[in-house]
Image (cartoon, rainbow, N blue to C red):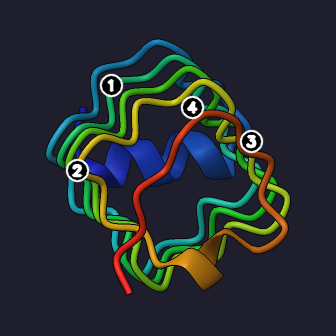
Amino acid sequence: MDAKDVVLAIREGRSLEGHNLSGLDLSCQNLSKAQLKNANLSGCDFRKSDLRGADLSGSNLYNADLRAARLRGANLAGTNRIEAKILKWGLKGAYITGPTAYQD
């Protein structure tokens, strides 16, 4: 599955739960309300993407880039965020549990 397929699936309201999307460039995309629960999102580029209301719970965000992503209302509970690039202010309004390292 490539980035175009992902964006189309999300626009159509299809769930991508459990899919392997590792390494995709999804920067500057409208991914609001995306269903990405338990997905492999390691190494994905989400810079400047709209992830408001998205369900990423249980997903692998290892080394993902979420700088300047809009995460208000996003569910990040139980995600692996080791080495993920997340700015502290970018998590405002997101549902998150567990330890998080921030890049300031």
Which numbered disc, 2 or 1, marks the residue that appears first in the sequence?
Answer: 1
Q: Which mark is residue 75?
A: 3
* Local secondary structure at mark 2: loop
Which residue is rendered at x = 74% and y = 38% of the image? 13
Residue occupied by mark 2: 83
Residue occupied by mark 4: 36
* Of the two numbered discs 3 and 2 in the rendering, the one whose residue sits closer to the viewer: 2
Q: Which mark is residue 40?
A: 1
Q: Are the residues flagged by discs 4 and 3 in contact, CB closer than 8 Å?
A: no
* Of the two numbered discs 2 and 1 in the rendering, the one whose residue sits closer to the viewer: 2
* Of the two numbered discs 1 and 3 in the rendering, the one whose residue sits closer to the viewer: 3
Q: Residues within 10 Å of mark 3 (few under 14, many from 20)?
A: many
- Image position of 9 (left or right of 72): left
- Asked if residue 75 is positioned above or below residue 52 in the image, the reply reads above
* Of the two numbered discs 4 and 3 in the rendering, the one whose residue sits closer to the viewer: 3
User: What amino acid is labelled 1 in the image?
Assistant: Asn
